Structure formats: C-alpha cells, structure tokens
Image (cartoon, rainbow, N blue to C red):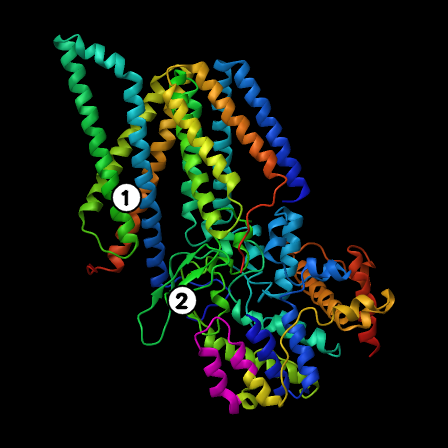
C-alpha cells in the first residue's frame, strides 16, 4: 500500500467513526442516513462497473459478466434507497443481509489467505464481527435503538480495522 | 520463459553463435538477470532504480495502480518481458483506452524485436544477454500484454492442455501462491479473478500462472481480446523457433551476419542438435535446467557455473562512483536503461500514453528521470564507434 | 489457428462460443434474478402480512376475495420462480455444451412474456400514480423488469442461433 493509499484508508476510517457517532446520537435519522450511504455506495459501484463494461468489457471474452454485476449493484442500491421510504424494519432487514453477505465473503477470503500463509487474521476478524452484527440485529429486530447501537459497533469495528490495515503489510499478490 | 531457457539455453545458443565460454556465460548471466533486477536489488547496491527490469511479488504489493503507477509497471513489463508486437494494430473495435491496451499485446517478430537486437550491437555481452531475454520472451508470452488489463489478459474456463495420445485436459487454475504446479494432475496456479480492469492480478499471463512458461506446454484457450477465437499455443514448436532465432540474433551481434531481420532462424546451425533440443523442450518437467546445462557443457567443453545474481555486486559496489558504468553491472544497468528508454519512446511516439511520456534528447534536451542522464554518454559512445 | 493481431471476420466456431458464453452468463443472471424476486416477494409479504391477515380474518365476501387474490399472487410467484430456475439452470448447461430440450426455450418465452407484462404494468403505473415516492418505486421496478426482459431476449436469441448452427442433439 502506498503512502497515499494509507492516508486515504485512515481518512476513510475516521469518516466511518464520525458516521458511527452520528448514528448513535440520532438513531432513527442515523439509520436512514446509513441506508442512503449504503445505497449510494452500491449505485456508484454499479455505475463504475457499467462504465467498465461499456469502455472495455464489451470487447472481451466473458465481458457480459461485468454488465450483470453492474446492473445488480445498481438494483441493490436503488432497492436500498426505496427502503428508506418504508418502515425502517425493511431497511434493517436489508442491512442485515448486506452485513451477513459481506461477513461470509470476508471469512472465505480469510480462509483462502490462511491456506497461502498470507495475513488472514484481520480479514477473519472483520468477517466474524460482520456476521455477529447480522445475528445480533436479527435477535433485537424489535428494538430500533438497540439495532442502531449494534450498527454503530459494527461500523466502529470496521473503521478500526481499516486504520490498522493501513499500517500492516497487505496480502501477497500472486503474479507469474 | 524460465531459467532453463534464459540462462542455460542462451548459453547454448551463444556457444553455437561463436562466442567463447566466458562471453557465453556473461551473455547468459545478463539474460537471466532480467528476471532478478528489481528495485530492491538496485537499491541494495546503490544503483539507479529506473534500471529495474522486473518487479517481484512484494514490490507489486506496494505499487500504486493509479495512472503513474500503471505507467511504471507498463514500462518495465512491456520493455523486457512482453515486447509489443504491433504498436499500430487495429483492433476493429473499442475506443482509445481499449486500443492503447490492445496495441501492447506481445507478439513475435514485431518491429521492436529488430530494434531491441540492433540496440545491443557493439554494447558488450550485458546488452546482448538482455536483448536475448526480450526476444525469447516474445515467444512464451505472446498474446498477453505487459500492462494490467482484464480486457486483454483475462483467461476463463475454456483452457485446455493438449497432450499427445490423450484427450485434451481442461485446466482449472487454483489460487494458492507458493504451491507447486502439479503436472501429473494438471493442477496449476494462477491469479484470482478480479473484475477490476487495472488490478495487478491482470498483469501479463498472471491469470494463467506459470503455465505459458513451460516449454512442454501445448494448450488452447480463448484470449480475452480475440472475440472468442481459439488460439493453439504450441510451446515446444515455439521454443525451438525461439532458440533458432536467438542463435541467428547472436550471430548478428557477434558480427557473422550483416543485418538482423525478423522472422529469420538459424535452422542449419541448430540442426545437428535438433533431436536433443526437442527432447529437452518436450520433457515434462517444471524447469529443465539439467537438460540444457548438459547440452551447453557438451557444446563448449566447459562447466557452466550456476546462476548467482550476486556474482557481480562487489565489483559494482566497490568501484568509485564515476567508474561504475564500466563495471559488469554498470554496463548491464545502462543496457536496461537504453532498452526501457527505446521501448517507452516507441510506445509514446505511437500515440499511446500507457507507458508514460518520452522526450527525445536530440530535440528537447534532457528532462525527466535523472537516472537516464547516463544514457546520454552511453549513446555518444555508440555513435563515436 | 494462426492468430494475428488485426481484426477479421469471426469464424463460426467463435460465434458459437460467444453464444454459449452468453447463455452461461445470462443463465446465471436469470437464476440470480429469480432469487432476487423471491426476496422481494418475501419482503412484500412481511410488509403487508398484518393487513392481509386482518382482511382475510374478517371473513365474508371481502375475505374470500383477498384470499383468492393472495392465492393467485402466490401461485404466480411460485410459477415465476420455477421458470427462473428451469431457464437459468438449462441455459447454463447449454452454455457448457450440453444440449437441453426445447422445454426450457418455451419456459424462457413464457418468462419473457410475463416480464413484458410487468414492464407494461410499470409504464401504466408510472402514468397513473401521482405520489412522487410511489413513482420512484415504480421506476425502480421498471428498471429491474426491463433489465430482465433484455436478458431474456438475449438468451432466447443466443439459443436460436445455436440451434440453427448446431441442429443435431449433442446429449
């Protein structure tokens, strides 16, 4: 990771901490903001993928995959946005699903890195916490304030890991 | 290609081309050094880091993939390992970004091959060896590009090993870095799929791991840029061609041939050893150092010492600063700078910005990376000769 | 083949591989869309379950109508899901070179017709609804439905081309 990327990671970590404080201070509004943030992030990622497809991917073998990824990311993003209009329970369910999915992906990545002898503990920690957040939210689904607190904790943990990873060696990249 | 070809086979080719044992060793050392001369190595001996001819895994971990970082990566890999075949190629599709990457696809017998060989003329064994590395790699690495690009370098599940007497075997690349490839079961390692266009995982033939570098490998696959056309890559045949071309190029550099032309091969000189060479190439091993070494020692009558990347370090480090260019590594470094400068300029002159800007010294004077100042005298030397 | 780095007309084999790859990728997309549709139906049910339970619980003619409508919706949802699974799995298999029967093409056409109906409903809904929030919801649905329609169209076209170029069964 270059110095610029390290600075970027630390800055993002601090921003995430600020968001966590916001969600904690104003649970109801905070959850909505969180939902909008996730929605925006997904839509931007989707648009990036679509751009990649239009400029490069449509000329490559198997490039349609990029198109589908882009479309799905945008769909997930606008769906998240639409949930901010609905009773917050649906937004919570959606966020639970996202946390559970990303937790699973982190665990799989950590497992792969472990097999390699690469760094895996941080990724594993992230995955476990994400899954715990998802499970805890399901357990306390009837209490929006508790859920907001749980999301805060999840966000703080992610922020902490991001800041720590900025100063650690990243996983080995295999190139022939 | 790997050490068996870059070091031992090049030694064999140099001997056949008329170089003596010491010269052949120097040439083959310089050839193999192109796979070891990293920024880390150059820093350790106090040499200009712009002369880096490769990047190791740990260095690639730290490299940026912003436009500046990508230019640095492209300069190294396109100059020494994935020499572009045709900087004017027309893909018939896509915009400027796609076209620029398409034009960096490595191929044999392109105009840059001739320029690479001619650049080494009269420069000593270091430049000769480095040039032979570049020429040889065009045969193993053809159809991949020396820049990170999913759209050019990706491979997919349509990847089959062709083995004589057996049905074609589909290869699925695992992602366990450090684990040895298993030839018996057809299990090989490659980089993990990353949907990002500029990911380091999509550099060169990383998606196919080391497989394209195996001399015995015959395989068919769908290059990402080829519109679903299947390519049959016949390494045994290509490696033999590569060897014969290297012999021809070395004879030119030795002074036995007046001019160097692409697509010419010294089949006649190699013919007496054809069966032996083909047996070495076709032997199903990860690296056939023993086979090539045996042939080389038979050809020259001398023992070939093992490659040691630190062999010339002390000479370089102990030389006074203004005398370092005259040492073995000093001359190698100048040759590397010259090659990188030439290729970067050619890419830039074709309108392609992927390797960064290039400024012609004759027209614009010196500007840019200080390391290249040494090239000014290097070129003056050649023109005086 | 001797590959060169210049553009040329694609060979028949290349076109076949492209169509197979299209089937494999879109088949995967159809499966994912089916899963997505299931998620949406479940979430819709959760959202309106209380109102539905109350309406059905009231009994009488209204209750019967609600029950019937709910039954139709559930039946349609299940039918749609089954179509997604058949079409998705079969397209993936055909993309890998295994010739599938014509049933899955029929299913793909049925699914496309259903999706086209959804798109039409989305357009009518957009014109009829005035509330901005609801309009946005309809647009969202419309984008997803239109995407599905395009994917199904691509899938059917690729299948037809493949069957035209390879008329014999390979199973």
| Mark-to-mark CA distance, 1 and 2 | 28 Å
Disc 2 marks which residue? B220
Which residue is painted at 22% across and 43% down in the image? C86
In the image, is residue A40 above or below residue B261? above
Circle 1 marks a residue in which chain? C
Disc 1 marks which residue? C88
| Predominant SS along the magenta part | helix
Residues rendered magenta in the picture: B271-293
Residue B272 lies in magenta, yes or no?
A: yes
Relative depth, front residue between B262 and B245: B245
In the image, is residue B333 above or below residue C20? below
Relative depth, front residue between B323 and C7: B323
Q: Secondary structure at mark 2?
A: strand
Q: Secondary structure at mark 1?
A: helix
Residue B228 picture location, percent across and down: 40, 59
Relative side of B222 to C87, left or right: right
Residue B235 lies in magenta, yes or no?
A: no
Give the quarter of the image for residue B250: bottom right
Relative side of C22 to A4, left or right: left
Q: Residue furthest bottom?
A: B272
Residue B144 shows in the view: yes
Residue A99 picture location, percent across and down: 43, 30
Circle 2 marks a residue in which chain? B
Image quadrant occupied by the N terminus of chain B: bottom right
Contact between labelled residues 2 and 1, with CB atoms less than 8 Å apart = no
């Amino acid at each position: 990771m270059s110095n610029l990327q390290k600075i970027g990671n630390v800055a993002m970590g601090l921003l995430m901490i600020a968001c966590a404080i916001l969600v904690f201070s104003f649970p109801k509004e905070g959850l909505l903001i969180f939902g909008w943030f996730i929605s925006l992030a997904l839509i931007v990622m989707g648009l990036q993928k679509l751009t990649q497809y239009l400029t490069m991917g449509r000329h490559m073998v198997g490039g349609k995959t990029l198109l589908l990824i882009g479309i799905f990311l945008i769909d997930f993003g606008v769906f998240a946005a639409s949930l901010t209009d609905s009773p917050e329970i649906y937004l919570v369910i959606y966020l639970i699903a996202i946390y559970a999915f990303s937790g699973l992906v982190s665990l799989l990545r950590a497992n792969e890195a472990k097999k390699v002898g690469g760094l895996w503990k941080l990724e594993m920690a992230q995955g476990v916490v994400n899954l715990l957040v998802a499970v805890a939210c399901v357990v306390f689904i009837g209490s929006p304030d508790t859920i907001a607190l749980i999301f805060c904790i999840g966000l703080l943990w992610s922020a902490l890991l991001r800041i720590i990873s900025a100063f650690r060696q990243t996983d080995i990249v295999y190139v022939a | 290609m790997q050490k068996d070809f870059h070091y031992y086979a090049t030694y064999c080719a140099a001997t056949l081309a008329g170089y003596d044992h010491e010269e052949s060793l120097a040439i083959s050392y310089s050839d193999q050094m192109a796979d070891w001369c990293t920024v880390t190595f150059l820093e350790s001996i106090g040499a200009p880091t712009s002369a880096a001819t490769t990047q190791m895994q740990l260095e690639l971990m730290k490299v940026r993939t912003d436009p500046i970082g990508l230019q640095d990566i492209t300069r190294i890999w396109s100059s020494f390992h994935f020499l572009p075949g045709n900087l004017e190629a027309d893909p018939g599709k896509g915009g400027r970004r796609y076209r620029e990457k398409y034009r960096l696809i490595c191929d044999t017998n392109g105009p840059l091959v001739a320029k690479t060989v001619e650049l080494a003329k009269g420069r000593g064994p270091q430049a000769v060896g480095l040039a032979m590395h570049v020429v040889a790699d065009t045969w193993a690495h053809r159809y991949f590009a020396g820049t990170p690009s999913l759209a050019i370098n990706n491979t997919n599940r349509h990847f089959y090993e062709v083995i004589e007497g057996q049905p074609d075997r589909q290869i699925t690349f695992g992602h366990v870095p450090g684990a040895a490839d298993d030839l018996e079961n057809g299990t090989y390692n490659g980089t993990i799929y990353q949907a990002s266009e500029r990911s380091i995982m999509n550099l060169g033939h990383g998606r196919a791991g080391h497989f394209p570098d195996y001399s015995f490998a015959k395989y068919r696959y769908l290059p990402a840029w080829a519109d679903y056309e299947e390519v049959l890559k016949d390494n045994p045949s290509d490696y033999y061609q590569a060897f014969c071309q290297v012999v021809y190029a070395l004879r030119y550099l030795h002074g036995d041939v007046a001019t160097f032309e692409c697509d010419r091969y010294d089949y006649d000189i190699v013919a007496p050893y054809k069966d032996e060479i083909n047996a070495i190439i076709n032997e199903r091993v990860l690296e056939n150092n023993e086979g090539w070494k045996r042939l080389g020692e038979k050809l020259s009558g001398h023992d070939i010492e093992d490659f040691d990347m630190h062999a010339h370090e002390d000479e370089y480090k102990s030389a006074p600063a203004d005398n370092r260019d005259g040492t073995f590594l000093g001359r190698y470094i100048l040759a590397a700078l010259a090659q990188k400068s030439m290729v970067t300029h050619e890419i830039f002159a074709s309108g392609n910005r992927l390797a960064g800007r290039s400024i012609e010294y004759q027209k614009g004077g010196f500007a840019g990376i200080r390391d290249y100042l040494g090239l000014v005298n290097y070129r003056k030397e050649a023109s005086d000769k | 083949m001797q590959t060169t780095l210049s553009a040329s007309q694609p060979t028949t084999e290349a076109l076949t591989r492209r169509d197979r790859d299209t089937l494999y990728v879109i088949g995967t997309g159809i499966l994912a869309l089916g899963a997505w549709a299931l998620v949406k139906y479940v979430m819709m049910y959760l959202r309106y379950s209380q109102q539905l339970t109350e309406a059905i619980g009231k009994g009488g003619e209204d209750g019967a109508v609600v029950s019937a409508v709910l039954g139709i919706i559930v039946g349609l949802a299940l039918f749609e899901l089954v179509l997604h699974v058949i079409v998705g799995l079969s397209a993936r298999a055909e993309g890998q070179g295994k010739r599938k029967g014509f049933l899955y093409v029929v299913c793909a056409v049925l699914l496309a017709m259903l999706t086209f109906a959804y798109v039409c409903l989305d357009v009518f809904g957009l014109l009829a609804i005035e509330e901005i929030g609801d309009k946005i919801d309809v647009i969202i649905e419309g984008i997803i439905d239109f995407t599905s329609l395009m994917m199904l169209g691509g899938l059917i076209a690729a299948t037809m081309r493949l069957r035209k170029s390879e008329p014999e069964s390979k199973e």
